[in-house]
Image (cartoon, rainbow, N blue to C red):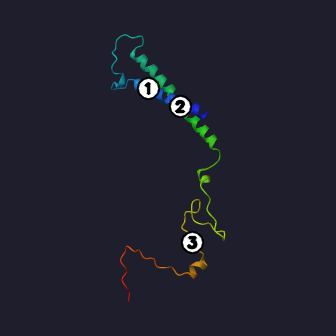
Amino acid sequence: MESVVLVVHLIIALSLIGVVLMQRSEGGGLGMGGGGGGGVMSARGAATALGKVTWGLAIAFIISSLALTIIARQQLGSSSTLDSLPAAEQSEDGTALPGLGSDLLPPVLPSDAANDAAPAEETDPDLPPAPASN
């Protein structure tokens, strides 16, 4: 069903582009080659007919756009993009390990682990050593 509506939508879009390009603009546009000679339809009548066709195609384009949106939403169901992300991994003590699907805050060390282990000074091998303090 969605592919049929999509094909109809594309045909309407291409038709709308063609009709708009055929219309005469204030500056002449693509329709500037025609003279004012006596055709079956006058210039005013052709402009009115093309205007009506443009309005009809524009309304059909909006309706087909809404139909595509409704069809896509029905196929999606009630799932969310976040539901497709993997859940946070659990450690042995039941706390969540950092990773996809977990909180975006930085991990916090448990209070007993923070007291037992002194923070190790990390040095960057690319930087010169810090001056000794007295």
Q: Give the CA distance from mark 1 to mark 3.
A: 62 Å
Earlier-in-chain disc, 3 versus 2:
2
Q: Residue 47 falls in which quadrant of the image?
A: top left
Which dot marks residue 9?
2
Earlier-in-chain disc, 1 versus 3:
1
At horizontal 46% and vertical 79% (from top left) the residue drawn is 121
Q: Give the CA distance from mark 1 to mark 2.
A: 14 Å
Q: In the image, what residue type sits under mark 2?
A: His
Earlier-in-chain disc, 1 versus 2:
2
At horizontal 59% and vertical 53% (from top left) the residue drawn is 82
| Residue placed most toward the observer, 123 or 50 | 123
Residue positioned most to the bottom: 134
Q: Image quadrant for the C terminus?
A: bottom left
| Residue placed most toward the observer, 104 or 23 | 104
At label 2, counting other C-alpha atoms closer than 10 Å, the crowd grade (few under 14, some 14-19, many 20 or more) is many
Q: Is residue 52 above or below residue 116?
A: above
Does the CB distance between marks 3 and 2 fall below 8 Å?
no
Which dot marks residue 108?
3
Q: Give left or right: position of 86 versus 39.
A: right
Q: Give the CA distance from mark 3 to mark 2.
A: 53 Å
Which dot marks residue 84?
none
Q: Image quadrant for the N terminus?
A: top right
Does the CB distance between marks 1 and 3 fall below 8 Å?
no
The picture places residue 126, in percent across and down from the top left corner, at: 37, 73
| Residue placed most toward the observer, 93 or 34 | 93
| Residue to which mark 1 is pinned | 18
Q: In the image, what residue type sits under mark 1?
A: Gly
Q: Give left or right: position of 126 versus 74.
A: left
